[in-house]
Image: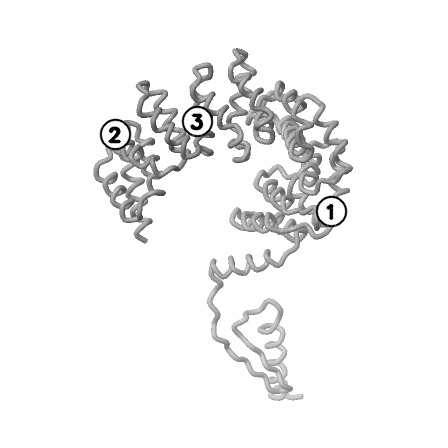
Amino acid sequence: MNKAALQPLIVAVLATNLIASPGSDPRYQISNDGDLVEITILEQQPAPTRESKLKKFKEKINSSSLAQLLILYSESFRPNEQALILERVSKKRIRSFRDIHSLLSFFVREDLNARRAAERSLNRLSPDQDGAFSSVFVDLLDDEQPILRLFGLIGVERLRPQEALEILYEEAKKPFDIHTPSLAIAPTPAINFRIKFLTLEILADWEGKKVLKLINKRSKEAPSVAKLSATYFWKENLPTLMKWSRSRKREDLIRADFGWQASPLIEDLKATRETLWEVLNSQRYDQEIRHRAAIKLGLVASKDDVSNLLKLRQEEKKKKIRLLYETALFASQDPRIIPILRDHIMKNPNPDARAGALTQLSQFVEPDEYRKLLLEMVHNDPDKKNRDRASKTLQLSSE
């Protein structure tokens, strides 16, 4: 074969091996038809943008299983990608035992964001749909590692398998190891504290009044537990809460403080209005406790209660007591507090109180009237933070 005859073959081989080889420049397209070789220069494609890459990544994680998300998270080093992965994890429902294993792998990491995402996914468990997974969580309650017991406890809280009750009671009967958790303590004691607290909360919600005595007993070791008895058993425990509130013992006063922080059912608060009045009007109780009682009374105040509060506020000479009645009135959301709110906006020396009064007044006035009040604060309020905040709110309202 002469040189002229070899030339097309050489061109074809070179084109195939060099230009069209794997990983070659995608701007060229090779067509090899026997002795005829055509090389077409394609239109150059723009480099993918950050937005297109992000869109593609979101599509990938949205179609991934929990096991695949775990691999992606382990391989990722970009914080924005990790955040997107964890957001997706938190929205996934458990469909298999493998999913539980993947969630557990997220949960045991020394990464609070990963742990929270796994917990939010666990909270999607339903006793009606996911009861078949109960045994896994019950078995974990007896594990030696606290982090695994906590994972199992969260699953038990959602699924409520009867076989877990005995284990829960055994845990609840053991005393707390620490008084209160803090950032200064090691992770293991903090996890153990949460396990015991969550165990008591599950029993309160699951078993009802029969565990009230046990919860109050544990509150001697960990005062924050008093919040559970006040939340779940407000009516039944209110006499005990009042007793703690009048006590001179520091441990009782701390328990009382946690108890008054609770948010019981509105129906339970309504049933104790008379007692709340008693605490509000009695000097036997600390000012802060009376303040908390005022808030709770205001939340369930009847029209007659509001009328009485308005009268008492008008007649009261002591500023501290007047503030208690105003606290109850503001919590009531009754329209008759509008003049008091206007007065606070104009005259209260506390800038936060002025701003708070304006915010609450916005619920009662028309949008145009609210904008006028905001404009007035922008021009006349002596506090720069209030002026800036009102200006920003005005801008948002006009968009």
Q: In screen coordinates, is 314 left or right of 304?
A: left
Mark 1–mark 2 distance (CA, rounded to whole Å): 60 Å
Which dot, 1 or 3, sits closer to the camera? 3
Query: In the rendered image, which residue does mark 1 sit on?
Result: 131
Residue 159's quadrant in the figure?
Answer: top right
At horizontal 46% and vertical 29% (from top left) the residue drawn is 297
Q: Give the alpha-carbon distance from disc 3 to disc 2, as whole Å.
A: 23 Å
Image point (59%, 56%), residue name: 61
Q: Amino acid under label 2?
A: Lys
Which residue corresponds to mark 3?
294
Vertical order, 299 against 118 (above or below): above
Q: Quadrant of residue 315?
A: top left
Against 319, residue 166 (above or below) is below
Identify which amino acid the numbered label 3 is placed on: Ala
The answer to whether the residues at label 1 and label 3 have Cβ atoms under 8 Å apart is no
Type of amino acid at the residue the image marks with label 1 = Gly
